[in-house]
Every structure is written in structure tokens, then in C-alpha cells.
Amino acid sequence: MTIKQLKAKERNLESGSRQQILDVALKLFAHKGYAAATVREIVDTVGITAPSLYYYFGNKEGLYMELMQTHCARIDQALESHMHTSSSARERLKDLVDKIFLHVANDRDFFRLMFTVYYGPSQGAPYCDFLSYHAKFHAAIKKIIEEGIASGEFKPGNSGYMTWVIRGVVQLAMEEQIKGDRKIIERQTLQKILDLILDLFQQPNGKSKE
Amino acid sequence: MTIKQLKAKERNLESGSRQQILDVALKLFAHKGYAAATVREIVDTVGITAPSLYYYFGNKEGLYMELMQTHCARIDQALESHMHTSSSARERLKDLVDKIFLHVANDRDFFRLMFTVYYGPSQGAPYCDFLSYHAKFHAAIKKIIEEGIASGEFKPGNSGYMTWVIRGVVQLAMEEQIKGDRKIIERQTLQKILDLILDLFQQPNGKSKE
DNA sequence: GTCTATAGCTTGATAGAC
DNA sequence: GTCTATCAAGCTATAGAC
């Protein structure tokens, strides 16, 4: 116990306690859930005591909320700056999906937490509006598909259904990424599956791949 | 409190306490998570006291495990008896998906629990092998697709990728079903999206729908 | 089988010294 | 800012009467 705390104390010199609490809390919330991740375990892992945590964040909810706000802001950033190329609908779709996929891969613990809070039981965690991010992503895909149909790049069809097809494989890829035991669908595989779908959506007279 | 318990006691006459504990526990585990659903809340909701629960199930883990075993056995049943028609690959695929979808719709709380334990943090819940069910379902879809390709019903292609596409929309449909605020993808919608995908997989000379 | 009563522990949170 | 020491409340679980 004392040895562990000494080692942790050394690390404290590198980055501030405040940031370390955030890092450790995210990992524990993501892997054990909001209810099962205890304040004690968080502070023990960091190598500090409980009052420090309460000094910075007020209470457990405050810590959780700050984590949510920080990482949600990053998603907003990623989703808003997603279209600066005026290339084909196919390329824009693949770019958007790739960007989101990389974002999830680089912030696995947060997305793990987000997914389980969104789809799963609240566990007493404070409410957080994740629905809007799902909606934004869904709408962005649908818009590109509709533009692709309008320009004649894709065959005419129910753009709503086509959107679900795309979102389905992206969702699976994200979830497998989040589960993390082993990445079954990785970046290139997702792109290849996307190519397969888009080949099927494409007008017969269009070029097949690039 | 006393009024509530009296009302609950009346209900106890209809079905045994043991079954009522199982019903209530499933609902609470699914909506609050294993850690956040307390023994107290379970027994209070049923209208009994804690020792009765421990009499039947030993401890909280025992209650959880019995729930898992019962409902997992039903999945096995549903997955094993899924192909008695020797119709087209398209029809077999649609049948399989429809059967699973109905199964999820009829046992929403269990699947909600299953999904969140599988994809999310363990919350201290005892381990349960859900991976095998995902694998079985995945393999069943893949097998039908490969048979469809072999018989010439589907275009040749990477059956692995095609399987992910199908599983993607089914996964989304299940998750939207489980979330439950509102069913975005319902039974017929899923079948229509499946038709869209299968139209794309189908050989050009084959019939389009039926 | 079901209860009352309670043990024994862990939780989130705080008062007050330094 | 960070600690020691501690609290009240909540948790799982049990002993023992009926």
C-alpha cells in the first residue's frame, strides 16, 4: 500500500493531480461502470486521498460531468469540421466514417463509457444528452447519400434505408473496437466493407472503385 | 409502505414469490445495472423481505446467474431450430433475422441486460459467456450467405464482409429496440432494409423480390 | 417459507490540522 | 492543496423466532 502510493506520488510530479484524477476516473468509469467505480478506488489508483478529489470536483457527479463535457466537446469539433473536400459522395462518406472511426479508436475509454450509458442502464449516472451525437452522425451520412443520389452518383433509392445500412456496419466496427479484447473490424476492413456497400449503391455506368 | 406491501402481497397469491423475484430482478438489473439494482429494492418491489430472496437464491449472484441460465437456454432453443424450410437463401435469411428480432422484442429486458453486460463494463456482475451467442448468430448468417453464393442465388463476393453488412443493420435494429424510448426500426422496417441489401446481393438474372 | 432484528462492511462525503 | 480521522447512510447477508 505504501509502496504503491510512493510510486504514484512520483508520477504526480509529472502531471498535476487534477488531470491524473480525470485520466484514472475515465478508465475506471469505462471499465467498471459509474456505480461500480468507487471514489476510493480512483484516489487509491492515483495515489492521493479522497479530500483532494472533492476539492477539485465537488463530488463524484461533478467529476463525471467534467469528463463528459470535455470529451463531448471533442466530438463536436470532429463532427463539425468534416467536409472540406468537394470530392465524390463516395469519398466524402468514406472520409467521414474514417474520421469517426479514428476518433473512437483514439478515445476508446470515453466511447466505451458513452455507449454503455447511452444504450445501457443509467447506473445512477447523471443524465447526458448523447442522443444528439448519434442523430448528428446519422444525419450527416444521410445528407451525403442524398447528395450522391441527386448527382446521379448513386442509384435512386430509399436514402433512409441506405443510411441504416451504412450506420449498421459502422456501429458494429465501433462496438468491436470498444470491446477491445481483439479488434475484429479494423480501420482498413471497415473501409473495404464500405467499398462493398458503395459499389452496390453506385450507378452501373459509374466507375467501380477509383 | 404498508399499503404498498399489502398490494404486493395480494399479487403474491397469483404467482409464487420465487417467480416474482425473478421477474422484478430482471427488470431492475436491466434498467439500473447489476451494481445499482439493490437487493433491498428488489424485495421491496415484490413486497417481501430480504431473507426470502436469500432463501431461494443464496445470494445476489445466485439470483443473477439463474436469470442468465434460464434466458440463455431460450436463445439456444431459438437459434437451434431455425431452419426447417428448404426455401431460398433469401427467405432463410429473412426468417432467421425475423425470428431473432421477435425473440429480442419479446424478451427486451433480458437482451438489454445481455447487451450491456457484453459490450459494457462488468459492474461486478459474474461472468457469463455471451460471446458464443454472437458467434453462433454470426456463423448462421454467414453459412446461409455462402450457400446462396454457391447455388448461384447471390453474386460471388466476400461472404465475410456481406455477413457484417447484414449483422450491422440487425444489430442496430436490436439496439434501438432495446433502448425502448421509441422503436425507430421495427419489424417490417428491418425486413424492408434486409430486402434492399439482398436485392443488391442477388444475381442480376434472379427475381428481385417475389 | 416468511418474518424481525441486526451484524459487518463499503460507500460518498466532510471537518479541521498543516 | 493535501493530509488524518471520521461520519452517516447504504449495502449484502445472516441468526433465530414463528
Image: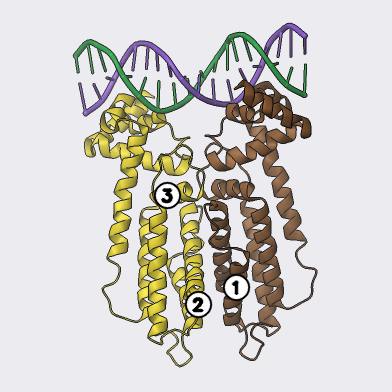
Chain colours: A yellow, B brown, C green, D purple
- Residue type at the position of mark 1: Lys
| Front position among marks 1 and 3 | 1
Measured along the vertical axis of the image, is residue A210 above or below residue D13? below
Residues packed near mark 3 inside 10 Å, few (<14), some (14 to 19) or many (20 plus): some
Q: Are marks 1 and 2 in contact (CB under 8 Å)?
A: yes
Please indicate, yes or no, whether residue B126 appears anywhere in the rendered image. Answer: no
Residue B59: percent from left, percent from top: 65, 28
Q: Residues within 10 Å of mark 2 (few under 14, many from 20)?
A: few
In x, y percent, where is residue A133? 38, 57
Check disc 2 and report its element: helix, strand or loop: loop
The numbered mark 2 sits on a residue in which chain? A
Residue at image mark 2 = A158
Residue at image mark 1: B192
- Pointer 2 with pointer 3, Cβ within 8 A: no
Q: Is residue B67 above or below residue A105?
A: above
Q: Work out which residue is located at the far bottom of the displayed protein and give it.
A: A205
- Which residue is found at the position 58% from the left and 49% from the top? B112
Residue type, numbered disc 2: Asn
> Residue visible at 36% across and 56% down?
A106
- Locate residue B140, reporting x and y percent: 68, 66
Residue tagged 3: A114
